[in-house]
Image (cartoon, rainbow, N blue to C red):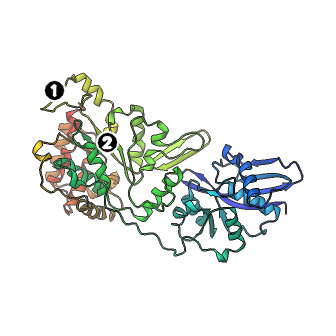
Amino acid sequence: MALFKTKTAAIYGVDALLIDVEVDMYLGDPQDFITVGLPDTAVRESRERIRSSLINSGYGYPRKAVTINLAPANIRKEGAGFDLPIALGIMGAMGAIPADAMRDFLAVGELSLDGNLRPVRGALPVAVCAKASGIRNLVVPRDNAAEAGVVEGVNVYAVTNLSDVVQLIEKPQCAKPVNGNGAAPALEPRAPLFDFRDVKGQETAKRALEIAAAGGHNLLMVGPPGSGKTMLAKRLAGILPPLAFDEALEATKVHSVAGALGSQSGLLGERPFRAPHHSVSHAGLVGGGVGMPRPGEVSLAHHGVLFLDEFPEFPRNILELLRQPLEDGQINIARSNLSLTFPSAFMLVAAMNPCPCGYFGEPSRDCPCTPAMIQRYVGRISGPLLDRIDIHVEVPQVKYRELRSEAPSESSLEIRERVHRCRCVQMQRGYPNARLSSKMVREFCRLDEAGERTIEAAVQKMGLSARAHDRILKVSRTIADLEGERAIGVRHLAEAVQYRSLDRTYWV
């Protein structure tokens, strides 16, 4: 047999597309190994890896010319995951594998020179692709088995080397898939590593974080160095509601494509918490890079938290890139030859000092910063970006008596229980409060006459935009939900307006 076909998949964004691998052998120079179908450098380099792995595994290598076609040809193929399907195609063309043996198999994997298999990126999207394409059997390296095995309806086989694959193909009835029970894995949140019980004082900030977690709201903390902003932010992940299965699947796909999953990782069990440094690049934050774009930090934080410490130290042009994902929950990356959309529905939590030295407004320290210096510093954050942050809270220095107090504080587990109950109420409406559309705001955030007067006075006195007006209503809705109230009251509105006070204090 001179022509043999196998199936694999190529990563495209956070999804995978089915690829047919066609291997043809003909009389010619054995050094001729031609790969067509828009392969990248890693795919073209597969020749030497495949040749050595076949020889070292005892299967030999044909003394003929070989042409490999990766179809469809208009999709760019990247990575070393094509090694295994190409090697199986060559073996099939040599007659070492029966003609119809690979008809219901899809394979991915990088080959070592000795025939062992290395893990690849995107095993979870590949498993989803196999299921969508009606392919019953998926062959992956053993280190990718945990993530691929969460997909129901596909038999996922974990293999260690090329010989294991051949044995599986010849005797599939003797192999056992890693996901044989067909049940979705349980997602039980673990006890938080960082607990709010360790935080002394800062009751206002803790209340703001609870409201933010309950409604999925973006939050900005402003305070002097050492006041506990980073400490509070790290504990936010511990009070977020547990991931639903669909959310975990979406978030895990992003991490799988980015190569950010461990070898024993299945679905993510906890919401992601990403904290990039302020020196992060454009591509590092929103995605991109050379070749096929990869997800950035905003996508790796999907269904979780993106924490930006020292907020004004990020370049302004990079901060402005956050506008689209904050508004739409996704980021579009357009190139001349392709356009990709990555999911990015995250909570933004930012922390900053009130001025360059950090001590503006602190009674115990002198601030040498002039008003012009302070305005330039806070002006690095534009008004449109600030409008997209629902809650602003000041985090002052902790007083000595609070710092030394032995009074017990509420634990993260207690707060998370309230947050979870509140989020369940919101999901009956279809979305967390932070994601309510304008139409849903009008429907679920109705005000009585006293409430209308309160919000009107706040908008006129503080000069708030229409977007800030809607976000006050959304935060009010979350506060009411936390208290189990069906209607938004004046006290809920008053507390929500309090969390917009930075509009007036700094951005004037």
Q: Residue furthest bottom?
A: 173
Number of the label disc, if any, that sits on residue 350: 2
Question: For residue 379, which quarter of the picture?
Answer: top left
Q: Is residue 403 left or right of residue 246?
A: left
Which class describes the residues within 10 Å of circle 1: few (<14), some (14-19), or many (20+)?
few
Q: Give SS at disc 2.
A: strand
**Front in this rendered view, residue 262 or 66:** 262
Q: Residues within 10 Å of mark 2 (few under 14, many from 20)?
A: many
x, y percentage for residue 201? 16, 48
When asked about the image quadrant of residue 15, the answer is bottom right
Disc 2 vs disc 1: which is toward the camera? 1
Question: How far apart, in angstroms, are the residues tagged by discs 2 and 1?
Answer: 25 Å
Is residue 54 visible from the viewing direction of this image? yes
- Residue placed at 29% from the left, 52% from the top? 236
Outermost residue to the right: 27
Give the SS element for disc 1. Answer: loop
Q: Nearer the viewer, residue 449 or 279?
A: 279
- In which quadrant will I find the N terminus? bottom right
In this rendering, the count of numbered labels is: 2
Q: Amino acid at mark 1?
A: Asp
- Residue 304 is tagged as none
Residue 202 pos. (x, y %): 18, 47
Q: Quadrant of the C terminus?
A: top left
Residue occupying the point 21% across, 55% down = 197
The residue where tag 1 is placed is 366
The percent position of residue 251, horizontal first and vertical second, equals 45, 56
* Residue that appears at 78% across and 56% down: 23
Direction from residue 118 to residue 413 in the image, left or right: left
Kind of residue at badge 2: Ala
Q: Nearer the viewer, residue 339 or 235?
A: 235
Residue 432's x, y, as percent? 33, 57
